[in-house]
Amino acid sequence: MHPFTLERPRDAAAAIALGSAAEPATEYIAGGTDMLQLLQDDVRRPERLVALRADVLDDRIDIQGDGTLRLGAAATMADVADHARVREAFPLIADALLASASPQVRNMATVGGNLLQRTRCAYFRDVGVAACNKRRPGSGCAAIDGDNRLHAILGGSEHCIATHASDFAVALVALDAGLRLRALHGERTVALEAFHRVPGDTPHVETVLQPGEIVTAIEVPASGALSRHAHYLKVRDRASFEFELVSAAVALEIDGDRIGAARVAVGGVATKPWRLRGVEDALAGARADTAAYRTAATRAVDGAVPRRHNAFKVDLLVRALVRALEIAGSRA
């Protein structure tokens, strides 16, 4: 492991100041469940780590008067998933969190850190592989002609086809969540759908965060009727502690036998949490039945670019999405 200095700032302002400095090379650590692996594997080599503890960042979980859910970035995945009002008003979020990692990891991992976790691409995490544009910009992408079974069919480029790993982020994108970001000179709000970047020709730049900027809170607008008919489906190689091959977060507003509105996002198939607006448009106004779900789900693979080992994801994505819609639509 590369040696580093650990800083424990007294508050968020001090943490931001440390992260904004040009030198030494600095990164943030919160729960550390992903960062510690990257440090041990020599993938990340910061000279300084800045700890974002609960006394530096907010860890509160609050449903406000207008129904908006506000999660402090330092709240743990376990605390959010187990929160009674979150389970009642935002079941899609609770389901996605409980489908993630293991109880031990959820007890440590923060919701802010979960959104910033790095890809599980084996080529990225193996420093013995030279060709990884995420780890070494300009070196190439070993996955394109290599073992790409777990890689993206949506949002990729000739420079990178690594998938984003967060279940939680997929559910949040489906629910139009926003992030509160804080830097030296103020705060801003960014839609989570726009927070992660597609790789293009700069796959090492994964988010819109500026140097020193930190995520302070996640805000999810009231889901209302959408919370009643919602489901998070995760298809994976084994039943627990496994990243997805395909996941789908769906929420439907159903009036009688018709769909008034739909929210759909998927994971495991794209380079970022992927919103399927074409599927949503196809569902709006349609009958809430399997035939309509199947017709709409075919739009999920618009623009897909399958590779040698992951072409199965095209059919799997459509089938998984239909199943998620059937489950959500059948809920009373």
Image (cartoon, helix red, strand yellow):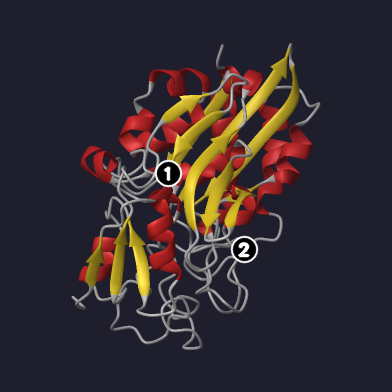
287 and 14: which is toward the camera: 14
Could you tell me which quadrant the N terminus lies in?
bottom left
Q: Position of residue 240 (x, y in %)?
A: 28, 41
Sooner in the amino-acid sequence: mark 2 or mark 1:
1
Q: Which of the image's four quarters has the C terminus?
A: top right
In front here: 225 or 233?
225
Residue type pointed to by label 2: Gly
What residue do we see at 40% from left, 32% from top?
60
2 vs 1, front mark: 1
Q: Is residue 259 visible?
A: yes
Label disc, if present, on residue 73 of the rendered structure: 1
Q: Residue at left 58%, top 39%? A: 321
Residue 270 screen position, x and y as percent: 55, 58
User: Helix, strand, or loop for circle 2?
Assistant: loop
Give how far across and how far down residue 193 sits, in percent: 62, 50
In the rendered image, the vertical position of residue 185 relative to residue 327, given as above or below:
below
Query: Which mark identifies residue 155?
Result: 2
Assess disc 2: are there few (<14), some (14-19) or many (≥20) residues with their C-alpha within 10 Å of its C-alpha: many
Q: Secondary structure at mark 1?
A: loop
Please give the count of numbered marks on the rendered protein: 2
For this view, does 273 lie left or right of residue 121?
A: right
The amino acid beneath tag 1 is Ala
Residue 244 shows in the view? no
